[in-house]
Structures are given as structure tokens and as C-alpha cells.
């Protein structure tokens, strides 16, 4: 933009020195300069790159010379932002280098014309979407990749590595960690969320970014037993990936995978886990890992020493270890996990249903036992080497102080409406940091097929939608809120969730509620939820190629009761039939 670039002088050093002597500029010795008794007219190009010095005419009076000097000081003072990046300005500012922030910034650069856009990344890498494959209007599958800051090459976009420290909504500016500030017309907060930690103990680990995934791998390598707490996507993948190590899985619910599936779908998704389940853990006769491998100073440094980057993404095996998550066989066969423990040919899993972690006790001084004792809500105590916390996330809303007037929900997420705007004018939010609260008219039967989950697919959608809302070009036909749609991969299987896929919000005891199912072990699982003859939701595992057809049927509100059970008949080509 010109204001942050180093000015280049056109003259040679000798020519500059000659002119300095002529106009009486004296060096202060600290990189700054002051004017002496001579006179000069300083010609500046504030938005350019040159600084020219021109001698004054000899007939100038003293008054004119003094006025010239004053004007010169004023010019230099007015150009201060160009000399010291203490103040910058953009039409649109996006805070956050995760998928929602990067997507919002990319979309703004395409639709905002000549407007200036600034992305405050807060770290040295950006999270972007690559290999995007469009499955339907609402469904996309994509990879999350780490990109350098200069990967956003649009001429109207500037990327800052500084971290945003405070949002001054009254003066419409973002205060940065380097002491400078960035003024804006409109700002979008996309700072994401961070994992909930059950304890600050250094042996309590979480999965956040590439660094934490590699730390987790190094820790599990020396572990005999780990306790995994949580029942979401990350917890499920961790239990599947960890091998050669005993696993105690603390699940708050009464079946596996409750965050995504019901008991029936979850059982189909774990064909290999059933072979590893045990009723109790055997007594280990192997000695514990040597304590000198992990000193106290090393643990503290790893746990609190660095700022964490943006979240790693759903395919964390790919980002951290280079594993192709789309390859089904390595995800299904036992013994091919990316996280290897210290045991040999032993990967038992003990699931503790209906319990949570109450507390963590440090046993580091006990050289013969477990270094960590986890107390469950049932009162049971479990010894382990590490506790892996996968119990959800906390919105990173610290930037928005409660005194700023921006409304937060009970979980400290920024409350936004359909247009992604907060309670404060010109402040928007997208991704995991926000809580979308739609109007009552959007929550009726016709518009209740969307609900918020903190998923990468929704973060990307919200970032894109926020960009259109910020420039005033939000098209209702592009709204992401008319249908919940999520596509991802678990254990190598393509997973598609549409609408009220588990019957959310429907009266399951009503005679109008019906479930149709089709499954083939290891190949596909299809379940459709119907209410009053209309499709309300669907769960699709495997390569069914039914996602676009069912999405259209949900959106069109078509009565399909005349088909009965034939709706899922493999011999019936649904796509061709409804075309």
C-alpha cells in the first residue's frame, strides 16, 4: 500500500550528503535527523517510494525559510505511518488465520472491488482449503492445508502475522501485539476455538495443531496406557489410531460416537474396534518408561512455551503425519494406526460408559507406578501415562471484551444473526467463535433442518457467507442456513450427514415418524428419516452417491410416501426417477 514500505532515495550517497550540507541537516546518531540553519523544500510522495531533496532559492527570506522548515516537519510528521507501521487502515479487516478467516478474506478479495482488505493472522501460517470437490449445492469435501502468509497474493489484500490484542469498537480499530493499530470500516472476528483442557497438568494432552499432533505422537510412543476423554470425532479417531498401547475410553454417553451417530450407526462404523474391546485391563509387568526421557523443564516448555496455531482440521492424520485418510484399508485393518505405543501386539480398549473425568492426581514421585491417576465421576481411579482431552472446544472470544457492548452467549461465543453481524454495528463473526441465533421464523418446520455444530464445513461456509454480508451482497439463495449438510471421512469411509439426520427436533413417538434403512457390512450404511411422508434427514456411509438426490428431496419438501420401502431399493435409480 505504500505506507508500510521503506522509502528509497533517488540520489547517490555522495549527492545526498552534499544536499544535506547545503540545507543544514544534522545527524543525531540514532538513525533520526534534525534540521539545522539552512533551508530546503522537501518534495515527498507519500504513497510512492521516493524522497527528493531540493535546495531553496538564495533569495528566500528568513521568514520563508522558517516556514519551509515548519512545513518540512509537518510533512514528515504526516508521513509517520509510512515510517513506522504504528497506524494502518483497511476497509475490511478479518481477524483469524483459520479456515473461516482465510475463506472470508479470499472471498472479500474477489467481491469487494478495490477495497483494501487486511487479514490479521495471529501466527506464521494460514489454514486454507484445497482439493475442494463439490458434491452438491451444500456439500463439499476438501483438505485443510497449512499455507504461508504470502499465499494470499491479491493486490488488495495485506496479511499481518501480528496477533490481535483488543478490539476498540468505539474508534473502529484493532490493537495489535506489536503496539500498532489497524483501523477498519467493517471487521469480522474469525478467531476460532481452542480445546477444553481437563487439567493444566503437562501429562494432559490435546489435539489442536500440527505441533500438538506431533507432540502427541512422541508422547504416545513411550506410553503403556492412555485415557481418552470425549465422544466426538477427534476422540473416535484417536481411539482408532492409537495402537500398541492400552486405551481407557471415558465416554459421558451410553454409546460410542454420540456427537455424530446414534448407537446403530456407531456400531456399524467400528468394525475393528469390537475385536479390541475388553472388560478389564490386564496387569502390566513391563517397567514404566524411564523418567529421564521427559524432564520437568521439558514438559513445562512443551505445554506452555508456544502460541498455538489454527486448528489442525478433521483430517489431522494427513496434516500431521502425511497419512491419506481417504485410503480405507489402512483405516480398517488393525495395527496400522499412526500413533504407536510402547507395548507389542497389544491394543485393547476398555470403554467406560456414562462417566466423566472428575480430577487428575500427579504421581510423578512414584517411580514404580503410573505417573498419572485419573479419578472418574463413578469414583473409580485409573492409572495411566497420559490423559488425552477431547471433550470439545472453547470459543476464542477474548478479543471481544464484555465492556465492548458485543453480546456473548453462555459459552462466551459471539452472538450473530443470519447476516453474521453481532450486536455491535459493523462487527461480524464467523466460525467456531460465534453462536448463530436465527430468527423465530427460521426455526419452524420449514426452516428447522439447519443447526450449528462446530465443524470445518460450517466454518468455511460461514466465512464465505460473512464476506457477502459485509459487502451488502448477501443473496438468500446462497444462504447456508436452509439445510444442515456435512461431508467428511471417518476411518476411510465417506460420511454424509443431511438435515435432521438423527431425527433432531422431531416427535419420534408420532405415527408419522418413520425410519428406512439399508446396510451392507463394510460397504455402505444408508438411513433416511421421514416425517409425514417427507424426508427430513439422512445418514450415508460409504460411496452411495445418494447425497445430492436426498439433499434435493429434503429441500423440495416432496412427499415420497407413495414409494414406501422402495425408497431405498437398490434397483431403483432415485436420481433418474425424480429427474
Image: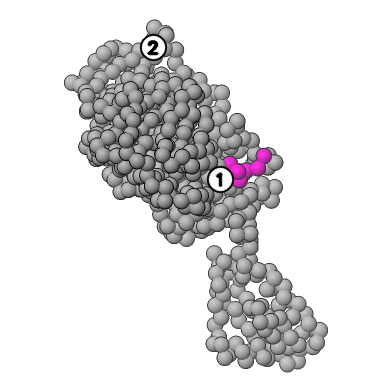
Q: Nearer the viewer, residue 11 or 190?
A: 190
Residue bearing the label numbered 1: 188
The kind of secondary structure the magenta stretch mainly shows is loop
Q: Residues within 10 Å of mark 2 (few under 14, many from 20)?
A: some
Residue 530 in sight here? yes
SS type, badge 2: strand
Residue 100 in sight here? no
Q: Residue at x 69, y 81 (%)?
A: 28
Closer to the N terminus: mark 2 or mark 1? 1
Q: Is residue 500 magenta?
A: no
Range shown magenta: 397-402
SS type, badge 1: strand
The reply, left or right, for residue 329 in relation to residue 531 is left
Q: CA distance from mark 2 to mark 1?
A: 41 Å
* Picture layout, residue 98 above or below residue 258: below
Expressed as whole percent of the image width and height from the top left, the position of residue 46 reads: 61, 71
CB under 8 Å between callouts 2 and 1? no
Residue bearing the label numbered 2: 513
The quarter of the rendered structure image containing the C terminus is top left
Report the residue that reaches farthest toward the top. Answer: 511
Amino acid at each position: 500500500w505504500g505506507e508500510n514500505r521503506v522509502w528509497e532515495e533517488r540520489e547517490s550517497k555522495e549527492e545526498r550528503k552534499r544536499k544535506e550540507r547545503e540545507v543544514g541537516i544534522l545527524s543525531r546518531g540514532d538513525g533520526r535527523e534534525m534540521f539545522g540553519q539552512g533551508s530546503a523544500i522537501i518534495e515527498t510522495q507519500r504513497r510512492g517510494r521516493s524522497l527528493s531533496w531540493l535546495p531553496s532559492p538564495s533569495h528566500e527570506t528568513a521568514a520563508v525559510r522558517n516556514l519551509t522548515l515548519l512545513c518540512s516537519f509537518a510533512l514528515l510528521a504526516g508521513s509517520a505511518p509510512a515510517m513506522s507501521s504504528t497506524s494502518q487502515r483497511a476497509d475490511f479487516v478479518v481477524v483469524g488465520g483459520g479456515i473461516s478467516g482465510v475463506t472470508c478474506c479470499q472471498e472479500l478479495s474477489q467481491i469487494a472491488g478495490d477495497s483494501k482488505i487486511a487479514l490479521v493472522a495471529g501466527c506464521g501460517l494460514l489454514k486454507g482449503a484445497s482439493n475442494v470437490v463439490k458434491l452438491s449445492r451444500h456439500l463439499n469435501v476438501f483438505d485443510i492445508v497449512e499455507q504461508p502468509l504470502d499465499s494470499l497474493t491479491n493486490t488488495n489484500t495485506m496479511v499481518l502475522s501480528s496477533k490481535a490484542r483488543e478490539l476498540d469498537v468505539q474508534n473502529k480499530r484493532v490493537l495489535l501485539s506489536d503496539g500498532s493499530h489497524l483501523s477498519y470500516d467493517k471487521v469480522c472476528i474469525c478467531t476460532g476455538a481452542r480445546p477444553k483442557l481437563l487439567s493444566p497438568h503437562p501429562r494432559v494432552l490435546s489435539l489442536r495443531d500440527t505441533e500438538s499432533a506431533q507432540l502427541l505422537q512422541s508422547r504416545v510412543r513411550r506410553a503403556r496406557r492412555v485415557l481418552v476423554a470425549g465422544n466426538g470425532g477427534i476422540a473416535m479417531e484417536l481411539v482408532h489410531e492409537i495402537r500398541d498401547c492400552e486405551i481407557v475410553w471415558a465416554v459421558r454417553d451410553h454409546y460410542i460416537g454420540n456427537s455424530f451417530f446414534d448407537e446403530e450407526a456407531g456400531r456399524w462404523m467400528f468394525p475393528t474396534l469390537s475385536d479390541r474391546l475388553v472388560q478389564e485391563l490386564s496387569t502390566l509387568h513391563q517397567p514404566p518408561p524411564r523418567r529421564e526421557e521427559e524432564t520437568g523443564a521439558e514438559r513445562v516448555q512443551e505445554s506452555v512455551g508456544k502460541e498455538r496455531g489454527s486448528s489442525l482440521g478433521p483430517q489431522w492424520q494427513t496434516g500431521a503425519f502425511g497419512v491419506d485418510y481417504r485410503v480405507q484399508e489402512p483405516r480398517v485393518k488393525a495395527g496400522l494406526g499412526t500413533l504407536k505405543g510402547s507395548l507389542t501386539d497389544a491394543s485393547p480398549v476398555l470403554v467406560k460408559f456414562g462417566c466423566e473425568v472428575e480430577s487428575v492426581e500427579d504421581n510423578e514421585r512414584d517411580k514404580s507406578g503410573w505417573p498419572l491417576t485419573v479419578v472418574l465421576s463413578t469414583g473409580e481411579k485409573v492409572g495411566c501415562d497420559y490423559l488425552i482431552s477431547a471433550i470439545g472446544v472453547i470459543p476464542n472470544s477474548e478479543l471481544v471484551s464484555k465492556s465492548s457492548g458485543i453480546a456473548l452467549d453462555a459459552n462466551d461465543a459471539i452472538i450473530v444473526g443470519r447476516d453474521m453481524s453481532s450486536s455491535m454495528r459493523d462487527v461480524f463473526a464467523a466460525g467456531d467463535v460465534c453462536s448463530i441465533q436465527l430468527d423465530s421464523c427460521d426455526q419452524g418446520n420449514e426452516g428447522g433442518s439447519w443447526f450449528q455444530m462446530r465443524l470445518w464445513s460450517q466454518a468455511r461456509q460461514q466465512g464465505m457467507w460473512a464476506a457477502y454480508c459485509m459487502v451488502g451482497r448477501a443473496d438468500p439463495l446462497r444462504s447456508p442456513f436452509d439445510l444442515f449438510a456435512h461431508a467428511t471421512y471417518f476411518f476411510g469411509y465417506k460420511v454424509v450427514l443431511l438435515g435432521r439426520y438423527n431425527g433432531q427436533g422431531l416427535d419420534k413417538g408420532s405415527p408419522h415418524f418413520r425410519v428406512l434403512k439399508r446396510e451392507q457390512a463394510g460397504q455402505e450404511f444408508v438411513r433416511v428419516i421421514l416425517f409425514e411422508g417427507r424426508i427430513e434427514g439422512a445418514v450415508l456411509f460409504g460411496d452411495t452417491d445418494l447425497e445430492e438426490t436426498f439433499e434435493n428431496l429434503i429441500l423440495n419438501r416432496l412427499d415420497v410416501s407413495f414409494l414406501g420401502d422402495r425408497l431405498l431399493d437398490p434397483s431403483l435409480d432415485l436420481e433418474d426417477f425424480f429427474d
